[in-house]
Image (tube, rainbow, N blue to C red):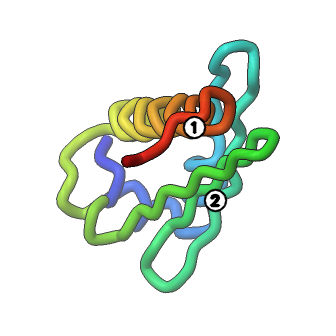
């Protein structure tokens, strides 16, 4: 099952719901549940945790070029989000600067 072809099969409304479920995960006892919206040909995935907001844009073009399953795609996105979250936490609480 490939992501882009599944979107065509199930439709955009159901795809948004499926992406929200697939991209929900638990990290360090916190539930990361995204809000997924569609703007033009771009899915916008937004995670909010306390003072941290992380956004990831996913274009239809990006999905069309991928030949992976939804599970593989979700794992990649989750890893990106965890990495960004850890970076933002370091900046917020350890005073790290981007010099």
**Among the two numbered marks 1 and 2 on one chain, the one whose residue lies closer to the N terminus:** 2
Q: Secondary structure at mark 1?
A: helix
Name which residue lies at 77% across and 46% down.
51
Residue marked by disc 2: 36
Residue marked by disc 1: 91
Which image quadrant for residue 61? bottom left
Of badges 1 and 2, the one in the foreground is 1
How far separated are the C-alphas under marks 1 and 2?
A: 26 Å
User: Is residue 70 left or right of 20 when viewed as pictured?
Assistant: left
Q: Is residue 22 visible?
A: no
Q: Secondary structure at mark 2?
A: strand
Name which residue lies at 63% across and 68% down.
37
The residue most toward the top is: 29
Q: Is residue 27 above or below residue 13?
A: above
User: Is residue 96 left or right of 32 when viewed as pictured?
Assistant: left
- Tell which of 68 and 37 is nearer to you: 37
The image position of residue 21, as x and y in percent, is: 64, 40
The residue most toward the right is: 50
Neighbourhood count class around disc 1 (C-alpha, 10 Å): few under 14, some 14–19, many 20 upward: few
- Quadrant in which the N terminus appears: top left
- Tell which of 28 and 8 is nearer to you: 28
């Amino acid at each position: 099952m490939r992501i882009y072809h599944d979107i065509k099969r199930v439709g955009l409304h159901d795809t948004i719901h499926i992406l929200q479920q697939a991209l929900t995960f638990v990290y360090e006892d916190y539930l990361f549940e995204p809000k997924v919206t569609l703007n033009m040909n771009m899915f916008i995935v937004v995670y909010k945790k306390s003072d941290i907001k992380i956004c990831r844009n996913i274009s239809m073009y990006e999905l069309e070029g991928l030949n992976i399953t939804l599970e593989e795609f979700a794992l990649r996105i989750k890893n990106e989000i965890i990495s960004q979250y850890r970076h933002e936490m370091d900046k917020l609480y350890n005073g790290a600067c981007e010099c």
